Amino acid sequence: MKLKALDQLHVSAVQSDSLRPGQVFDISDAAGAELLVRHPDKFEHLADDDVEAEPGSDAEKAAGDPVAPAAPPLSTKPALKRKTK
């Protein structure tokens, strides 16, 4: 279940830091339902199609960044031998 925090608050089951207003987070269905019953003015339930990527999230980075170029192939040439004194 995805919930959106409407106020700054702390839910240790979600993360160690405080949730910020407007922050979207995942939580189990049972825990999310309990939060909505206990604090209906603090959380908003979001349908899966209503959820947009948060600024700076991995989903946004993946959507905005082009695929990184592959590493160049390793050389098949033998290593040069250095002269030692």
Image (spheres, grey):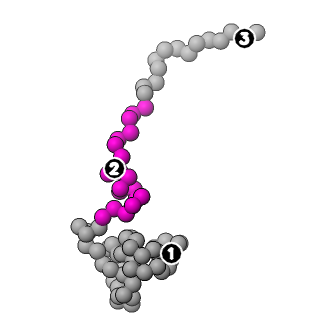
Q: Amino acid at mark 3?
A: Thr
**How far is mark 1 from mark 2, CA to CA?**
27 Å
Residue 4 location in percent, x, y? Answer: 36, 75
Reading the image, the residue beneath label 2 is 64
Q: Is residue 35 visible?
A: no
Mark 3 and 1 residues: CB-CB less than 8 Å, in contact? no
**Mark 2 element type:** helix
Q: Amino acid at mark 1?
A: Ser
Residue, x 39% and y 88% (percent of image)?
A: 39
Q: Which residues are magenta?
A: 52-71
Reading the image, the residue beneath label 1 is 18
**How far is mark 3 from mark 1, CA to CA?**
61 Å
Mark toward the start of the polypeptide (3 vs 1): 1
Q: Nearer the viewer, mark 2 or mark 3?
A: 2
**Mark 1 element type:** loop
Of the pair 61 and 72, the residue shown nearer to us: 61
Reading the image, the residue beneath label 3 is 84
Mark toward the start of the polypeptide (2 vs 3): 2
Residue 59 location in percent, x, y? Answer: 35, 56
